Amino acid sequence: MKLGCKRLLLAAVAFGLAVPTTVFATNGYFLIGYGQKSIGMGGVGVAYPQDGLAAAFNPAGMSWVGTRFDIGAELFRPVRGIYHNSATLPVNENSKGQIFLIPNMGGVYQDSPKLSYGFAVVGAGLGTKYYQAQPNYFFNFQGRASEWAGVSLTQMQVLPSIAYKWNDHNSIGASLALGAQVFRAFGLQSFGPAPTGLGFTSNPDAYDLTNKGPDWAYGLGFRLGWLGKFYDDRLSLGLNYSSRVWMTRFKKYSDLFAQQGSFDIPPNYAAGFAYKVTPKFHVAMDVEEILFHDIASVGNPGPDAANPSSFFSLCPGADKTPCELGGPLGLGFGWNNQTVYKLGMDYKWSHRLTLRWGVNYGKDPIPANQVLFNMLAPAVTEYHVTLGFTRVIHDPITKYLGGKEGEISMDYQHAFNNTLKGPTAFGPSGGIVNGTNASIAMKQDALGLSYGIKF
């Protein structure tokens, strides 16, 4: 059984390295949680490990789940819409492409009572696609752009991890974060120099700006975690720190992203608790801080809505070049850091059935004066509600793989529609507006299914 389990985990890690996970924005551009059990409880997991994806929240959690493997997928439907009342760039449209499949996978092998190792595959990303065949539609300035405009970003991290349980009540863990991401931009010719473009760069040779096809980047980071149990194991506390994942640059888009195509994965840290109210009823909560503002391409401000004669608020002097697209202080999306609150509960109805529900809230990271560039990335959802369940099964696959018990888990999540309104430098009369002339909106629904094996 041990040899078969090890082979299964190694094959799954290899699969995770080969296949990117495509997702779209929920908490910023990260999923609210990983795996159907976590998502059904609002995304908690730092102090309440439940399955093979424990390392995605806190590598120390692997010490408490035994040996198991989980694989699943989420059918995800984000509805994104934009509006811009502008003489230069008018638009009122929903993004095309509304349904996506998001896989997830993880496993843990308990080598001894003190030592466990395993992995998790986690993803993040965003994407939009707008029809802009009409002149002066969205970013089709003077009819010079493509028929379609948008972006697609897919991030993936594979987390080979180890956990050590130094006594009956405490464990520590560490993960190596192997990052990969792929990006594509299309239809953004109008981002180029004036007079044919909008002047976001003055470089006439800004060749690596748009329509270059998919470009890959790779990187490395780490994660550290602790989990402790108190009061006869009724109370669990956990901490997790995820470093920045330092990525190679997007060379095909070095004239679009700040610092010549740099797009690292932002650091984050989280604390959580779980409490066993009764032997059948648990309550868990996580608080997570995502440091989007640390990443220049995400955190640098976009075009200054208050100053249409100079888009570059980080360069108030005469030399604007460092703040142009691709520069060391280049235009970005203007995102703030985001604090996310997750609360979940589960109830063990019987030996074979566990029920879950949860809520998730994070104020959207986009300031109101940054709506223009964020039409390409309208990550404005804030409130999520979730439901889920797990059913223990006895199936031929589990028996064939030498497992003790199989599980089927499902979740449903809904993110309520949220609209962000703000000004741009391209108002109805061609200049700045005093109120608001643009808005971005998103709502989401998702349904997930996973299969787990306990060994």
Image: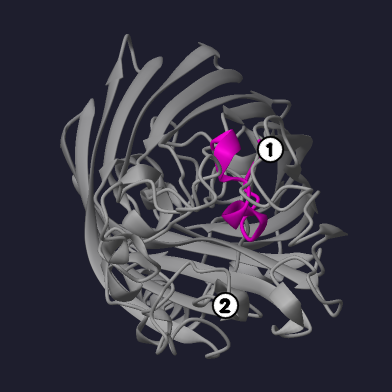
Q: Position of residue 422 (x, y in %)?
A: 66, 37
For disc 2, the marked residue is 195
Query: In the image, is 254 to the left or to the right of 212?
Result: left
Location of residue 324 (image quadrant): bottom left
Query: In the image, is 345 to the left or to the right of 79?
Result: left
Protein image colouring? one colour
Say if 95 sits above or below 401 in the image. Answer: above
Q: What secondary structure is marked by label 1?
A: loop
Q: Please provide the residue range marked out in magenta.
A: 367-381
Q: Position of residue 269 (x, y in %)?
A: 31, 37
Mark 2, Cα crowd under 10 Å, few <14 / some 14-19 / many 20+, is few
Q: CA distance from mark 2 to mark 1?
A: 22 Å
Say if 252 sits above or below 338 in the image. Answer: below
Q: Nearer the viewer, residue 253 or 362?
A: 253
Residue visible at 51% across and 33% down in the picture: 44
Q: Position of residue 287 (x, y in %)?
A: 43, 26
For disc 1, the marked residue is 433
Residue visible at 67% across and 34% down in the picture: 351
Residue type, label 1: Val
